[in-house]
Amino acid sequence: MVASIDILDDAYRHELSASVKERILLVRRVISDRKEVAYVSGEELHRSKAWAYKWLKRFDNEGLNGLKDRYRRGRPPEVSEKKFSDIRRELSENPSGWKVKEVMNILSMKRLV
């Protein structure tokens, strides 16, 4: 996909994310300015060629949206939802608050620490 210089410049000006701006700059320099990928990635952006080729491929396949970060799931919780709600209930039952040691004791009794 070939994007016009104006579209890339406009996207760069309005983008808030620094990492996405860096990727737009990569595309602009390589595609529009016809600079070598190795030069732009290494000398100008201080990144690897593999990084540059990854983002150029995503841009080629998806356009400007391909340069944005995708949602990634985190590590699944080690505590079941039931255990978590039991602990939350037990901690909320004390109106005077808890000390750190007391919370640690509750968690260790539930085998979470």
Image: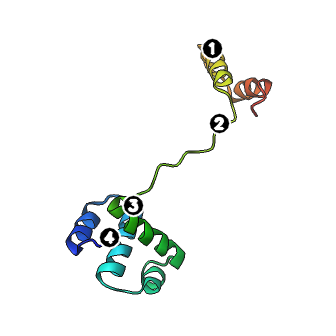
Q: Name the residue under label 4.
A: 1
Q: In which quarter of the image is residue 92?
A: top right
Gap in angstroms between the C-alphas marked 3 and 1? 50 Å
Image quadrant occupied by the N terminus: bottom left
Find numbered disc 2 in the image and state the secondary structure of the residue it sits on.
loop
- First in sequence, mark 3 or 2: give its number: 3
Residue at 65% in and 36% down: 77
Q: What residue type is labelled 2?
A: Pro
Image quadrant occupied by the C terminus: top right
Decide if residue 104 is on the left or right side of residue 24. Answer: right
- First in sequence, mark 4 or 1: give its number: 4
Mark 4, Cα crowd under 10 Å, few <14 / some 14-19 / many 20+, is: few
Choose between 44 and 30: the one closer to the eye: 30
Gap in angstroms between the C-alphas marked 2 and 4? 40 Å
Q: Which of marks 3 and 2 is in front?
A: 3
Q: Name the residue under label 2.
A: 77
